[in-house]
Image (cartoon, rainbow, N blue to C red):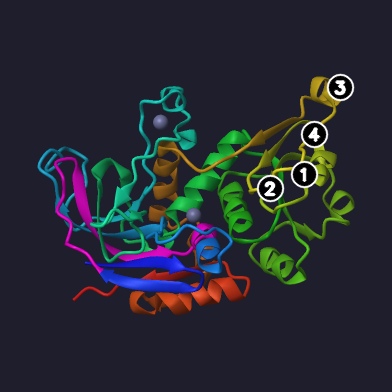
Amino acid sequence: MKVALITGVGQVELRDEPDPTPGPDQVVVEVAACGICTFERRLFAGDKQWYPVAPGHEAAGTIVAVGSAVDGLDGSPQVGDRVTMDLLTRCLTCRQCRRGKTALCRYRQGRVLSDGTVSFGGFSDTIAINAKSTYDIGDAPMTHAAMGEPIACCVHSLRRGEFGPGDRVAIIGGGLMGRIHMALCRVGGASSIGVIDISTERLEEAKAMGADWVATPDDAPTVGGKQDVIFVTAMGGVDLAVEMADLGANVVLYSAFDKALPATVGADKSHREEVDIVGAFSQEPADWQLTAAYIRSGIIADDLDKLITARYPFSQIGDALTLVTSEPTYRVFVEPEHG
Ligand SMILES: [Zn+2]
Ligand SMILES: [Zn+2]
């Protein structure tokens, strides 16, 4: 099998590794597509210096082998199943895992290459993975399935924000994550959805994809008015979100933020208006069931199509990484070929 490692700033290397065989609880998946996320972009750009590492955590593919302990179980994955994959592993034993907050597990059971290099699994043409971490996607496109991880993160975010049918929603940040939030809120029955961004291009694209209103941060309170759930998917805009919060609203801090940035709501406002600020980090197994259902059904297929910026053969992964580090993109995919 082939694996891609990021070995330094702007450096990627393809390496041959032994073909994986499934452990008793595992399946082997031939990877069809893997998306490039912020994590990989930061590694390649040198914003996060951790070398060498084999990243890639947004992958989908087809099952080609099934382990002995899960083979033939009713409902378990079978050879030929097309799946999206939860590549993050959780210990299921630590305090946070026992409380059900497995996204916060700090004892992830990572995989390693033959020389001990940490591998996330996605930047490879084949992967062995726990059967329970694969989710059937039917006939959906593999690029859509490879967006399973970001979709699951957004499903988690909607849960954290207690989003419900009829809610008025504002989304700060019109990038990939903002657009997935928009799609999920629409199918979830939002009564209105607004997108706030500094980029007029992104606002136009959000409008074309069905946003009820779009606005720059300065105009947003006037244009959008009060909201029930405000998702902050940009690196700023927390104060704007609190300003737009109606009685009983939730502000969800989805993005990563500068560590020094405070997120405040007045104590009396919190008491009298029940305005809550909550964080949303990563995803949990429960988020994947809904994610796979969305992908399988095609109900957000048009939204996902619009988020595919480019597709590269796996052998041209260097070009794919160069693209995401040189201009704004939604999602760029690498696609292993299988003979
Ligand atoms: Zn990701
Ligand atoms: Zn844990």
* Whether label 2 touches label 1, CB < 8 Å: yes
266 is higher (above) or lower (below) than 125: above
Q: Is 242 positioned to the left or the right of 321 in the image?
A: right
Earlier in the chain: of badge 1 and badge 3, it is 1
The residue pinned by badge 1 equals: 238
Three-letter amino acid code at disc 1?
Val
- Disc 3 vs disc 4: Cβ atoms closer than 8 Å? no
Between circles 2 and 1, the one closer to the viewer is: 2
Residue 306 visible in the snapshot? no
Task: Classify mark 2: helix, strand or loop.
Answer: loop
In the shown orientation, is residue 236 left or right of residue 98?
Answer: right
Magenta-tinted stretch? 16-40
Between label 4 and label 2, give the one nearer the viewer. Answer: 2
Label for residue 268?
Answer: 3
Secondary structure beneath label 3: helix
Residue hosting label 4: 264
Using the numbered discs, state the Cα–Cα distance from disc 4 to disc 2 in whole angstroms.
14 Å
Say the numbered circle drawn on residue 257.
2
Say which residue appears at 70% left-offset and 56% top-offset. Answer: 173
Q: Residues within 10 Å of mark 3 (few under 14, many from 20)?
A: few
At label 4, counting other C-alpha atoms closer than 10 Å, the crowd grade (few under 14, some 14-19, many 20 or more) is few
Indicate the secondary structure of the residue bearing disc 1: helix
Report crowding for label 1: few under 14, some 14 to 19, many 20 or more residues within 10 A (C-alpha). many
Image quarter of the C terminus:
bottom left
Q: Can residue 183 be found in the magenta stretch?
A: no
Total labels drawn: 4
- Counting residues from the start of the chain, the first of labels 4 and 1 encountered is 1
